[in-house]
Structure formats: structure tokens, C-alpha cells
Image (cartoon, rainbow, N blue to C red):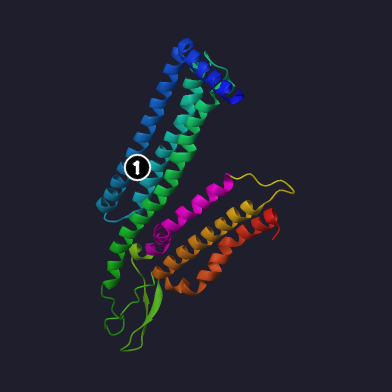
Amino acid sequence: MFGLFSNKKKENKKEQEQVENPEFLKLVAKWDVFLEKMETRFNESLVNAKEALLENLEESNYDINPTMTAWHGIKSQLMAMGNKVDTTFDEKVLPQMKAYKEHYDLLDEAAKGRHLREGVIFPKIDRFEIEMEGEVSQRFYNHAIQFLNENFNCTQCSAKIEVRKDIFRAHYVTCDYCNTVNTFTPNDKISQIRWIVDNIAKLKALNEWDAMQKAEKEFSDLRPPREGQDNAFYIAAFEKREKTSRAYWTKYFTERAVYLPEYAETIEHDTDVKMKWFYEERKRELGF
């Protein structure tokens, strides 16, 4: 009975606000429209950014440096869009709304902007960066690897020497005909392959990254149990973080080894190194 009375009271208050504060409701609607437009504009910017960067890579004859520099500039612009949401509310929306309500009554309106900024825009930028840098790097790799098919001849007898397709740095190669030791020095594009493999491996492990981020979010939303409370749910969420984190790093290092076989034997070790901080946190938080 009291609950019903309370609900009716809330409905009457809402109706009263609609009668008493029509200008405030107009501000709320205007704020909602602004947020919707910002999200639409942001999503369109991601599409345009991808097209522009891939075109930049081709037009530069696959010079990856200016393409990555351009991406950093675009990323700054995308981040600025998220920050604009906060500054617009603080500098324009909030002062107008305070003419009708106290600051603490406007927390829900501020939360709308914070959700768009921290729950939508910034996470999308993080994921888009993996996709964008990964695709640019994969296209660069496909172009650069062709140069390994060019002839490399012995400096002593001019015989053609086969060069390994998975070593992208200067190294010694022995001629099968005269046994002369030659130094193979790859061109700039081939030597750049080593540092772009990281981006490709991240892209290949994107599904595992998504699962890891979801587990991180679910865990961060939990309140740590107080002393004496059942902590089974907390441990389960922590273990899910562990499982998805290890799955991500295992996938990442496995994909890296596809392009750089010299790391094939260190996948498990490298994964353990990445997980070390996690186990330290587990011991600190859960005591095991």
C-alpha cells in the first residue's frame, strides 16, 4: 500500500514538473539531441578515418610511417570529441539547468554524457585502434613481403641465393655453390615488418581481447565483499578475468610466432610474463 502511494506521489511530482518546468524539459531534450548527434558524428568519423588511412597507405606507396602519423592525429581528434561532451555539459548545459534544479538533482543528466564519453566513445577508440593498426599493418606486410622474392646473388660467384622468408633483419647467408658467406641486408620495408607484426597479432586476437575486456568490466562493476561475507561470486569473476586474459595473451603470442618463428618456443614463457602482474594482484586481493 505504501509502495503504491509512493509511486503515485512520484508520478504526480513528474506531472507537476512538466507543468512547472517546461523550459527545463526543453533543455533536457536539447541535451539528449546533442548527445545523439555526437554519437552519430563519432561513428561516421570512424568510418571516414578507416577509408582515409587505407587510401593514405596506398597513395604513399606503402610508406607506413606517414599513415601511422596521420592515425595519431585522427585519434587525437576522436578523443577530443569525447572530451567535448564533458565540457559542453559543464560550461553550457549545467549552468542553464541550474536555473531550475539544484546541482545534485542533475547528476542523471551528467551521467548521460559520462556514459557516452567513457562507456561508448573511448572504448570504441581503443577497439578501433586495434582494428585500424592491424589492417594497415597487414596490408603493409602483404606488400613488403614481396620484396623477399627478389633475386639475391652471391657477391663472389653471382649465384642466386635463397633467402629465408621469416627473417626480416640483416643476417649472414652462405652460398651453396662457393660457400662464401654473404650479408643479406633487407630494404627498409622488409626491416619494418618486425615492428608491425605486433599490430597484426593484436588484430588476430581481437575476439579474445573482446572477451578479456568484458570480463574486466564485469569484475570492475562488482563491490569487493566485506569481511565475513560470501566471496564466491568475487572469486568467480576474478577467475574469469584470469582465464580470458591468459587466452588473449596465448593467442597474441601464437599469432606473433606465425610471422616471427623465432618466438615459437617462448609462447608459454611470454604469456606467463604478461600474467605475472595478474597473479600478484590475485595474491594481494584474494590471498592465494
57 left or right, relative to 115: left
Q: Is residue 169 visible?
A: no
- Between 261 and 237, the residue placed more toward the observer is 237
Q: Amino acid at mark 1?
A: Leu
Characterize the magenta stretch by its predominant secondary structure. Answer: helix
Q: Residue at x 41, y 58 (%)?
A: 199
204 left or right, relative to 48: right
From the image, which quarter does the C terminus lie in? Answer: bottom right
For the record, the magenta segment spans 192-221
Q: Position of residue 149 (x, y in %)?
A: 27, 72
Q: Which residue is mark 1?
A: 46
Q: Is residue 37 visible?
A: yes
Above or below for 238 versus 97: below
Above or below for 214 versus 40: below
For residue 172: magenta? no
- Between 24 and 260, the residue placed more toward the observer is 24
Q: Residue at x 38, y 76 (%)?
A: 183
